[in-house]
Structure formats: C-alpha cells, structure tokens
Image (cartoon, rainbow, N blue to C red):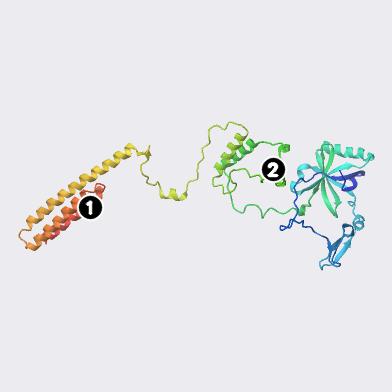
Amino acid sequence: MRSIWNGAISFGLVSIPIKVVNATESHAISFRQIHLDDGGRIRYRKVCELEDSEVSSAEIGKAYEDADGTLIPITDEDLASLPIPTARTIEIVAFVPADRIDPLQMDTAYYLAANGVPAAKPYVLLREALKRSQKVAVAKFALRGRERLGMLRVVDDVIAMHGLLWPDEIRATDEVAPDTAVTVRDKELDLADALMDTLGEVDLEDLHDDYREAVEELVTAKAEGHEAPEAPAGEKAGGKVLDLMAALEKSVRAAKESRGEDTGEDAEVTRLASGRSSARGPSRTEPKEVGGKKSTSAAKRTAARKSTARKSTAKSASSSSSSSSSSSSSSSGKPAAENRSSTKSASGTSTAAKRSGGTAAAGKKTATKKTAAKKTTPRKRASA
C-alpha cells in the first residue's frame, strides 16, 4: 500500500518512525457526466481566468483568499516550516479509556506502519502497552494543510489511527430532538426489549452492499443489451404507524419467524377506540344473518311485532265505527245538513281506519294516536 504521509510518533522521549496508509477503501460505483444528445463525455477543465487558457496540474498551487478577495499564495514549503511540533510528528498527548471518545468525532481511519527495521522495537512496545492498558491514545497531527486530532488504538497487530473532529465541530442536538412531550408506556418498552432480544446480534462480515450489487447487475445487463432487472414485488414502505403496539408485536413475530422460532398463538392487539363512536354510545344494528337468512330469534321478534300491529289496527277500526254510529243517532234532532256532515265525517273516519288496517307494518303507538284523534273530531261536531 502506498503511504500518504511519512513522519514519526512522539511517545514521550521515544520517537517511532512511521508511514501512514489509508485503512479504508471505497467500493462505490462512480458515474461520469455525458451529453444526452450525443453521449459525449462532459469534462471539467482547469482554466486560468487571466490568460483564459487551460493549465496543467504542475502549474497549479494553493492560495488563501482574504476577505476582500485578495489571493495570498501559500507553498508546501511554507506549511512544512510551520513552528509546530505536529508538522511531521504524531504527538501523543494522553491515554484515555476508549468510551471517552464520542463516535460522532470519528473520521477517516489510517494504518500506521513501522518505517524501517529500527522502528520495529518501539512500535511493538507502544502496541503492547495499548493492549495491556486497554486504553487509546489521543494525539495531534498535521495532515493536508491543517492540524487534526487523532485516536490511536490496536487492530490485530497494527496500530490504527482515527482522525477525530475537534469538539467544536460537533453540532448541538437541542434543535434535533422531538419538541413535543411523548409518554412511553412500560408495555411498549417491554415489546421493544423483546424485539431487540429477538433480533439478537449479527456478524458484520455477513452484511454487504445490496445497492452496489444491484447497480452492477444493471450495468451488466445494459452492456449486454438485455432488459434492466425489475425490482422485486413487495409491500411499499412508508405511511404512518397508527398503532405502535400492533407494529411492535408484528415485528417481534416476524423476527422470530425469520429465525425459525415458534411464535405460538398470535398475541391479541387492542385497537385504539375512536372517540367519536364511544361518545355516541352503542349503535343500533340490523339482525345478523346466518347462512344468508336472519337468525331464528330475530325472525320471531319481527313476527310478534307484525301480529301486535294487526290486532291494534283492527281494534281501532271497530271502535271508530261504533263511535260514528252513536254520534249519528244522538244528532237526529239537529238540522239535516249537520247530520249529513257528521255522517260523512264518520264515514271518512271508518275508511281511513280500514286503509290503516291494511298496513301491517304500522307500529302500535302510531295507530293508537291516529285513532284517538279521529274519535275526538266527530264528538265535537255532534255536540255542536
């Protein structure tokens, strides 16, 4: 591996010559920009604004831009001659427990290799001291034009260094946390714990980049002139979780099934009741049907109501007829016009009663009210 920095580790009065190499590599697939009309490659050229001409990398240096736009040239020799001890040295400043380092601070990782045979003995000494103390070393170093913070730890038989962000480079979390008060019940926490226990641990070696593999398959298919592979059918993610308990219980069951564990009987899920339905109280429902027909008890109740309605209507019609006859006889001494009016009214009442008697679905209460009203009318006219 090619080194990106050569220097030394300063360990008290001990100096360990080392070279720094990258500990990680990217496997991400990169794309090029093209002209959509003809597929031509789009390139970026480095052009000098004053000469309006393209320049090579050997002709390019660095400069600091002042507030007023003035460019102050800075050379590599200027940076190398800075009066700081970390210009070419990784200076260890402390040894601390590993949990003192916030993972948020961790940046790029490097391997530190002993540079030459004389560096092997002090290198192994520092490595074994870190192992036995179970601590990490906090160091300062300069790389790519700025001083940085680092953490040294042992990986296998190699000293690795993680670049660390300075504490003031970590943003505060007060604007990210939920701004509403939320109460979590113990039962919900118990289900979350059960889900964590069910998922268990995982070997990181078994994890791989599904997206990169899918892109590689897509590129291969298009290069060979085949159709692009289709996405597997499945449920679309997203949407609001309306019942947290149901989601947790379903997740626990799914995790157990994926591990081949016996889930037993499905847990009962209590759905959240709607405030609107509970406020109105129980709603009236039609008789349930069994096998396409109404249940026996419901049919009996319906027949009883119809029979009662028929009897009530018949009684009302009979009473109205006798009342009309009595009113006619008592008014024989009255003028003929009044007698004819009373007779016609009584006849109309009797006819209405017969029509109502033909309607079997009329209720008892409604039939009684109509009959009482019709009884009152002829009596008032007769007495007049």
Give the quadrant of the N terminus: top right
* Label 2 CA crowd tier, 10 Å (few <14, some 14–19, many 20+): few
Please give the name of the residue rendered at 82% of the width and 67% of the height, measured from the top-left corner: 69
Real-space CA distance between mark 1 and mark 2, rounded to the nearest whole angstrom: 79 Å
* Amino acid type, label 2: Asp
Whether residue 307 is visible to the viewer of this picture, yes or no, is yes
Q: Badge 1 local density, few (<14 within 10 Å), some, or many (20+)?
A: few
Mark identifier at residue 369: 1
Residue 6 vertical position relative to residue 117 in the rendered view, above or below? below
Q: Residue at x 43, y 50 (%)?
A: 279
Q: Assign a secondary structure to mark 2.
A: helix
Mark nearest the camera among 1 and 2 is 2
- Is residue 186 in view from this perspective? no
The residue to which callout 2 is attached is: 210
Residue 126: quarter of image: top right
Query: How many numbered discs?
Result: 2
Q: Which mark is residue 7?
A: none
- Going by the numbered disc 1, the residue's amino acid type is Lys
Q: Is residue 220 left or right of residue 332?
A: right
Q: Measuring 81% from the left and 40% from the top, which residue is drawn there?
A: 135
Q: Which type of secondary structure does the marked residue at label 1 adopt?
A: helix
**Left or right of residue 211: residue 24:** right
Instruction: Pick whichever, 214 or 146, lies toward us.
Output: 214
288 vs 189, nearest the viewer: 288
User: Residue 323's x, y, as percent?
Assistant: 13, 52
Q: Are marks 1 and 2 in contact (CB under 8 Å)?
A: no
* In-front residue for pair 87/291: 291
Looking at the picture, how far across and down is residue 384, in whole percent?
A: 11, 62
Residue lying farthest to the left in this orientation: 333
Image position, residue 242 (x, y; %)? 54, 47
Q: Position of residue 287 (x, y in %)?
A: 35, 42
Q: Earlier in the sequence, mark 1 or mark 2?
A: 2
